[in-house]
Image: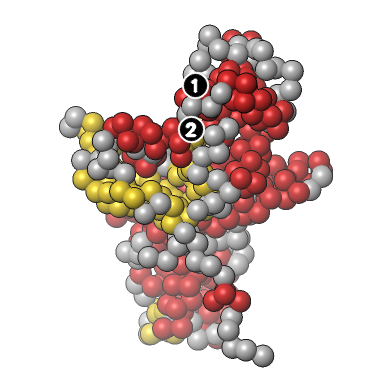
């Protein structure tokens, strides 16, 4: 029998996104004071912390929405924080998906048009985009609701439409900021089951900001943000 | 009231702070951990006797007179190691463990140990258990899911207590010092 361990034969997980010593203030108020965190490709990482701890700000920095005053953001071996806004915008559209707590659907559009939006913005033809959107709506149990507008959907249905829209363009990273924050326990659980199942099937990395332990329990690993710094509770999957 | 298993370790922790007589140990124990149910003297001395038998404490001196309270107990290296291990390891993540956690936090602050770190370790253990229960819900039937839910809600309550205590550590340390 050879002395080579099974672990040695497994490929090293690839670090897909990383914040290094990120600092950011809003006016005189510091939000991040040297936050460092990374996620491996395909990992579901929960970012926890009390209100005002900086966890959402960290998500926005990782996603290239906010630019830190100091520190670095890396995505797949590329520096993100030094990119100009148009390049970051393209990166967000092509590589990232987003789910927020409230008000993310365009009220004038139907459910299927909302879901098709990222594909249309990426240059897809309308028919193909709507076909793909309908497939995602069906996958998330929303058959028959394709023509409804957001005002005609329940909170849980609207959140599932938002999830379909976030995943339709097959992003490498899904950023979810309190995705069940406005839902009751049972509906929130349903959304989290769908979100994590879809992410695992697609191999999508998920950065999940939540203050709820029951939501964080869907993740592979959690970190806690406290006073603008990140405390890693369990080991990083990628060796430094 | 702490569980029976925690009483010897808590007394050992109090002894690590300073060598004490049985009476002083009971007074401190009741003040911090036995408010609703003070520790009987008999249990204090029986526990100290077992700890001495097992080499975790020694008797440093005996004052003249009769009775067990003449003895002054000192923690041994073996006893201190046991306290260290107990403080560092997370409690089994089952619901209703706040009293043991509370004892650990208070003792850690008394002994100048990293109480916040212990709370973080406990938080991680709780979240790991919650992940396991979530997986049971995902793969099991409705009965499994309902049982897992019951445990999840209680563990979540523990976590809220952990977060609140972590936010109040400075105030608690101040209260213990005064």
Image coordinates for residue A159, horizontal then vertical, percent: 59, 25
Gap in angstroms between the C-alphas marked 1 and 2: 9 Å
Vertical order, A132 against A204 (above or below): above
Q: Are marks 1 and 2 in contact (CB under 8 Å)?
A: yes
As drawn, the label of residue A104 is: 1
**Which is nearer the eye, A130 or B37?**
A130
Vertical order, B92 against A10 (above or below): above
Q: At x 35% / y 45%, what residue is drawn?
A: A226
**Which is nearer the eye, A238 or A75?**
A75
SS class, disc 1: loop
Instruction: Name the residue that disc number 2 marks.
Output: A98
Furthest-bottom residue in this view: A1
Output the chain of dot 2. Answer: A
As drawn, is A25 to the left or to the right of B104? left
Image coordinates for residue B6, horizontal then vertical, percent: 56, 65
Q: At x 53% / y 11%, what residue is drawn?
A: A107
Image coordinates for residue A105, horizontal then vertical, percent: 52, 19
As drawn, the label of residue B77 is: none
SS class, disc 2: strand
Q: At x 36% / y 54%, what residue is drawn?
A: A77
**Which is nearer the eye, B77 or A26?**
A26
Vertical order, A153 against A191 (above or below): above
Quadrant of image for the N terminus of chain B: bottom right
**Which is nearer the eye, A38 or A2?**
A2
Q: Quick one: label 1, few (<14), some, or many (20+) residues within 10 Å?
A: some
Output the chain of dot 1. Answer: A
The answer to whether one can see residue B84 in this image is yes
As drawn, is A150 to the left or to the right of B142? left
Image coordinates for residue A67, horizontal then vertical, percent: 27, 37
Q: Earlier in the sequence, mark 1 or mark 2?
A: 2
């Amino acid at each position: 029998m050879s002395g080579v361990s099974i672990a040695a034969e497994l490929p090293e997980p690839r670090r897909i996104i990383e914040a290094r010593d990120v600092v950011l203030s809003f006016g005189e108020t510091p939000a991040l004071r040297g936050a460092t965190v990374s996620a491996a490709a395909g990992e579901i990482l929960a970012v926890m912390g009390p209100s005002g701890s900086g966890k959402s700000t960290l998500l926005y920095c990782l996603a290239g929405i906010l630019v830190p005053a100091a520190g670095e953001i890396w995505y797949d071996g590329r520096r993100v924080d030094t990119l100009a806004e148009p390049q970051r915008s393209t990166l967000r559209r092509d590589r990232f998906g987003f789910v927020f707590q409230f008000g993310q659907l365009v009220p004038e559009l139907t459910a299927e048009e909302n879901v098709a939006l990222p594909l249309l913005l990426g240059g897809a033809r309308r028919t193909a985009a709507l076909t793909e959107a309908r497939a995602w709506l069906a996958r998330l149990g929303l058959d028959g609701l394709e023509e409804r507008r957001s005002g005609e959907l329940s909170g849980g249905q609207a959140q599932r439409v938002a999830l379909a829209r976030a995943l339709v363009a097959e992003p490498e990273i899904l950023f979810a900021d309190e995705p069940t924050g406005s839902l009751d326990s049972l509906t929130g659980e349903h959304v989290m089951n769908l979100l994590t199942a879809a992410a695992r099937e697609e191999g999508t990395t998920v950065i999940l900001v939540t203050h709820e332990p029951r939501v964080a329990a869907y993740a592979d690993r959690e970190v806690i943000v406290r006073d603008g710094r990140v405390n890693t509770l369990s080991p990083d999957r990628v060796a430094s | 009231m702490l569980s029976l298993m925690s009483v010897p370790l808590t007394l050992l922790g109090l002894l690590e702070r300073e060598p004490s007589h049985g009476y002083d140990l009971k007074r401190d124990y009741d003040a911090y951990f036995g408010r609703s149910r003070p520790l009987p003297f008999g249990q204090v001395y029986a526990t100290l006797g077992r700890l001495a038998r097992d080499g975790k404490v020694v008797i440093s001196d005996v004052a003249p007179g009769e009775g067990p309270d003449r003895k002054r107990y000192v923690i041994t290296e073996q006893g201190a190691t046991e306290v260290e291990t107990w403080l560092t390891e997370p409690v089994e993540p089952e619901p209703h463990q706040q009293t043991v956690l509370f004892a650990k936090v208070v003792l850690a602050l008394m002994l100048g140990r990293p109480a916040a770190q212990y709370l973080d370790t406990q938080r991680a253990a709780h979240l790991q258990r919650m992940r396991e229960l979530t997986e049971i819900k995902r793969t099991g039937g409705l009965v499994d899911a309902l049982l897992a839910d019951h445990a999840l809600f209680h563990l979540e309550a523990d976590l809220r207590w952990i977060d609140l205590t972590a936010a109040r550590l400075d105030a608690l340390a101040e209260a213990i010092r005064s």
